[in-house]
Amino acid sequence: MAEAERPVRIVVVQNDVDKGPGRIGDALKAAGAALDVRMADDELPSVAGYDGLVVLPGLNDPVDDLPPVHRARAAIEEALGLGRPVLGVCRGGQLVAQALGGEAYACDVEQGYHDVRSTPAAQDDPLLAGVPAVYSSLHAHAWAFTPPPGAVVLLENDVSVQAVRCGERAWAFQCHPEAPIAWVDALARAIRDPADGGLLPRTGDFFTRHGVDPDRLEADARAADASAAAIAAGIGRGFVDACRR
């Protein structure tokens, strides 16, 4: 099989049962990756057997002294030590930043769809080339991260840094490029009725406590759908290319 056609193997660390790889997972598979999705509640395989690592969001904080947080952090540290490409989203991104010398800190709560700005460096980034100067992305965080030493800021807004590249093989996102409309719709249902939506109770409660309007959430998801799909596709293609290299 030609190198360009060789499926790359990516281990995906999922932290909560209701927060899967979503659009990012679909984009990775479309670009030729085989995904091995593992829950951080269980022991994780060595990253040495894979071409790359993706660490997804989760309800726990990056400073929590809990086994799932420690497992995800250890996987990131192993991947970085092996030179494997790493992509972290939200809490995954916070753990990537921590592992590379940045800091995670409690920030203003940011939920729902809000604009992010791309920096000039994003246009030359393997994952974000062609990203709009300003676009709307889903946010769901009360923690953020400072860029590690030498990191290149790719996305930002007035609340926090939203994405960085560290070296040539590690990316940390604070916003949520992975969330599909179906997941946002489930969240909106859970906000209206905690027994609906099929999500973890803590997930809906995190948004309900901060007064997120489910109608606006659904409308904003649809308004952002085209750009969100394109951005996720670019992230998937770029990350698989990095894994092949």
Image: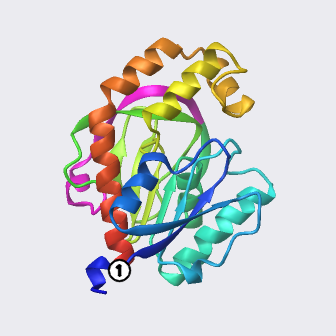
Residue 123 point in image, percent of width and height: 20, 54
Q: Quadrant of the C terminus?
A: bottom left
> Which residue is rendered at x = 66% and y = 52% of the image?
15
What residue is shown at x 46% (from left), y 56% (from top)?
A: 172
Q: Position of residue 55 (x, y in %)?
A: 56, 58
Region of the chain picked out in magenta, as a range:
107-127
Residue 139 screen position, x and y as percent: 48, 34
Residue 227: quadrant of the picture? top left
Place of residue 73 in the rendered image (x, y in percent of width and height, measured from the top left): 66, 64
Residue at the location (54% across, 47% down)? 90
Answer yes or no: is residue 151 visible. Answer: no
Quadrant of image for the N terminus: bottom left
Q: Is residue 16 left or right of residue 126?
A: right
Asked if residue 172 is among those painted magenta in the image, a careful observer would answer no
Residue in the picture at 31% in, 58% down? 127
How many C-alpha atoms fall within 10 Å of the one at disc 1: few (<14), some, or many (≥20)?
few
Read off the residue under disc 1.
Answer: 6
Query: Picture quarter containing residue 113?
Result: top left
Residue 122: say if magenta: yes
Q: Looking at this view, name the residue that lies furthest to the right.
A: 66
